[in-house]
Amino acid sequence: WLKGRIYERRSDISPDGRHLIYFVMNGKWQSEAKSSWTAISKTPYLKALAIFPKAECWHRGGLFNDKKSYWLNDGCGHLVLRDTNRLKRDTRFPPTDNFGGECLGVYYPRLLRDRWTLVARENRTKYNHVDVFEKRLLHGWVLRKVAHAEPPGVGKGCYWDEHEVLHDASGQRVKHPGWEWADIDRKRLVWAAGGKLFAAPIESQGIERAAQLFAWVDTMRAKINYPRPPVEQAFVEAD
C-alpha cells in the first residue's frame, strides 16, 4: 500500500497492459526515495521494479513507447535507486512539443500519442489556460476534451478536463461536464463520472445505450482482493 499521491497525468500503462509507469509523492524527504519518485511496476501492483527518486515535483513520470521501452520525463535528472532489465529506457524519445515542467509535459504528449488532435489553445489569464483536443468517432461524431490548467477550485485540482460530443453534419452538441475522463475503446465510448466507469456503443443517433462497468465508490470502504501472484513472483528482486 502507498500513502501518498499518484499523479495520474504523469503516468502511463504499457500497450500490452503488463506494466505501469507512475509518478508519486509522499512527502518523506529523508527516505531513500527522496519524497517523490517515478517508478515502474507490474499492473495492477505498485511494487516497483525500477525506482527513480527526485526530491521535488518538477518534470517526473513518463510514457511507454511500446511494450518493451519507455521514456522518462527527466528534466534535471533522476537518481536511480533500483533499475530493471525487463524494460529499456529510450533516451532518444523526448516529445517534440514542450508543454512545461508539470503534469501537462507528460499528459499532452500522451494524448497526442493516443491519436487526439490539439485543435485550440487559449490563454484566458496568466494562470488560466484552456486547451481543446478532439478525436473522431464513428458515424460523424467527434469527442472533444477541454483541458483546464488553472488555480485549484472546490472539488478540482490545478488540472481537470470536461467533455462534449459533437456531430459534424447535424451540428448537434451534447455537453458532459461530469465526465472526468473519456476515450474510445474499439467501437464504443468509455468514460468515468461520479466514481463510476461507463460504456456505450457509438451509434448514428449518438451515445444513448450506456452501461455501468464498474463503481469505485462501492470499494472505497471495502476490502480489495487482487489476484495474488505465484509464490516465485511474490517478491521481485532488482534486476
Image (spheres, grey):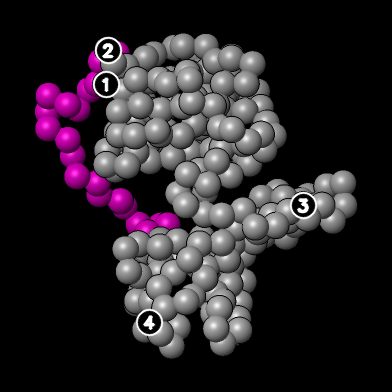
In this rendering, is residue 237 above or below 25?
above
Which image quadrant is residue 145 in? Answer: bottom right
Image x and y of residue 119, in percent: 65, 57
Q: Are marks 1 and 2 in contact (CB under 8 Å)?
A: yes
> Which residue carries the number 2 mark?
239
Q: Tag 1, which secondary structure?
A: loop
Residue type marked 4? Glu
Q: Which label sits in the foreground, 3 or 4?
A: 4
Q: Which residue is mark 1?
A: 86
Range of residues picked out in magenta:
217-238
The number of numbered badges drawn on the structure is: 4
Residue type, mark 3 in image: His
Q: Which mark is residue 129?
A: 3
Which is nearer the N-term, disc 3 or disc 1? 1
Task: Give the percent coordinates (x, y) of residue 147.
Answer: 65, 56
Residue at the spot of label 4: 203
